[in-house]
Amino acid sequence: MNGQNFIDGQWVDSHTHDTFESRNPADRDEVLGTFPRSNAKDVDEAVHAARKVFPAWRAMSRIKRGEVFDQFVQLIKKDHEELSRLMARECGKAINESRADVTEGIHMAQYVFGAARMPAGDVIASEIPEKDAYMRRHPKGVVAAITPWNFPFAIPLWLLGPSLVEGNTVVFKPSEDTPLMGQKVVEYLERAGIPPGVLNLVQGDGEDAGRPLVAHSDVDVVAFTGSFDVGSEIRKVCAQSPHKMAVCEMGGKNAVIVFDDADFQIALNAALLSAYKTTGQRCVSSGKLIVHEALYSKFCEVFVKLSKRVNIGDPLNEKTLMGPLINESGRKKMEHYNDLARKEGGRVLLEGGGLRGVEYGKGCYVSPFVYQMDYTPKSRVLREEVFAPNVAIVPFRTIEEAIAIYNDTDYGLALAVITEDYRKARRIREECEYGLGYVNLPSIGAEVHLPFGGVKRSGTGMPSAATLIDAVTHRTAWTVNNAKEIKMAQGLKAEIE
Ligand code: NAD
């Protein structure tokens, strides 16, 4: 397919006339399409189009704006399987996970469609009985939505859904690793009736398309999901414009904490799913299993035994648990951290990393790398995001130690605690730093109506998904006097003497 940008309701090529390819990470010989390598001029046109239609879109009934998403859901449901298969081919995600990604996008669209009929503010009491006071939400203006490759359908919907239904217009730049899924999101919203200019698509990489979009003076909110390095640069750029808000959801160094009273089966399954789903490439994947010393050797033995059995292969095969990594640099990064684990004193239980046999030769396949590691503060491999199946199993004795091992990272995104003791779970809840906590579950899994976001290097304290409404709207106070004279709050005299 020859992909294009979508600007002011028209499918157009980039001013650069340059393109890039999207290739299947499971078979680098397969080209899924070519897409425009956009530049600042394309970005400027897209932002201009979004700004121009903002007043008309804002003036439309919120319920009518929501109905676009109802129509979108009808269309996506018909093509659910086709889209899931395209996703599996474009980003290498196992087919059942690709289906879940499309379903999550549907859920977000359903949520905003329903939310459109819910209150858009509050009626608030006033000190003066004759006054009516309201909090009303106003859209901020033009939202730049910049997304990662690993949830190429759901995350765009998390950002576009609340932004558009609340009356903002959008310029969307998907990841250069998944431009095809980005184009599909926009094609379906166009078919669902989004008016020209309200949603614009600019394809390209971070340098030439992402940077000018973030820096554009007519963008009001940058809603970004991706790595810490990029997110922190975006925050710095936005801080230079007093009006511009940056909402950045970034990486994680997550953990599963297994207590001595844990249900062993739940602990194992939670650890395996947290470590290996999406081949460890979720922001909430766990590369740190913090296991009580009483269970430690048995846990290590069985975890390694099951890790050896993980099905690695074609993402379109229903039995596959781990498809390939997204690209060659993902594989190099994993190998770098495998070496670092050895250097920092890790005892390797399962050698893993790049797979290059006939079956895997055309893709960026890896197998799990599992190691035992005694806790030493500031260990880089226990603190940094690997984004691959590199898994440390770290023993602990007391709950204080478990909390210290978990918190010893600059990230604060997700944790799972496996215990039958509510007091232990409660202490983890209170003393660990995270945005998403799970009890007797894996550290992965999202529902669109729950906040999704982390603390420290993981986020900006403004969670994504449904709660993005707080970033893309401004809360206004509207106060109406119904008396025949002016009455002021705080007992302030209303007459000039
Ligand atoms: P990335 O940061 O490399 O890229 C994300 C997006 O930013 C892409 O669209 C890219 O083109 C763009 N970009 C790159 N440089 C830019 C710049 N200078 N200015 C503007 N845009 C720029 O991330 P990725 O590799 O696509 O995704 C993986 C990362 O995303 C991981 O760190 C993962 O933890 C994180 N992630 C976080 C969440 C979350 O909700 N917290 C969810 C999914 C993924």
Image (tube, grey):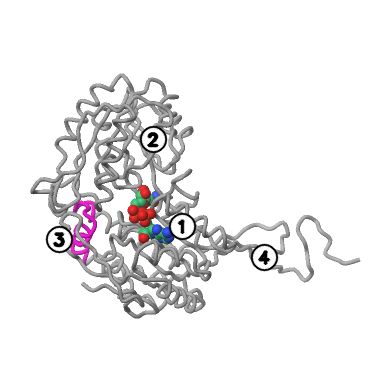
Instruction: Tell me which amino acid carries mark 4.
Output: Thr
Q: Secondary structure at mark 3?
A: strand
Q: Is residue 192 magenta?
A: no
Q: Earlier in the sequence, mark 2 or mark 3?
A: 3
Q: Is residue 88 magenta?
A: yes
Instruction: Tell me which amino acid carries mark 2.
Output: Arg
Instruction: Tell me which amino acid carries mark 1.
Output: Leu
Q: Which residue does the numbered mark 1 point to in the structure image?
A: 468
Describe residue 370's horizontal placement relative to residue 258 as left or right: left
Q: Earlier in the sequence, mark 3 or mark 1?
A: 3
Q: CA distance from mark 4 to mark 1?
A: 26 Å
Q: CA distance from mark 2 to mark 3?
A: 35 Å
For discs 4 and 2, the disc positioned in front in the rendered view: 2
Instruction: Tell me which amino acid carries mark 3.
Output: Asp
Give the position of the N terminus as an image quadrant: bottom left
Residue 317: image x %, image y %?
A: 12, 52
- Locate ligand 1 by image quadrant: bottom left
Quick one: label 3, few (<14), some, or many (20+) residues within 10 Å? few
Q: What mark, if any, has residue 271 been given in the picture?
A: none
Q: Which residue does the numbered mark 2 point to in the structure image?
A: 380
Range of residues picked out in magenta: 79-98
Q: Earlier in the sequence, mark 4 or mark 1?
A: 1
For discs 4 and 3, the disc positioned in front in the rendered view: 3
For discs 4 and 1, the disc positioned in front in the rendered view: 1
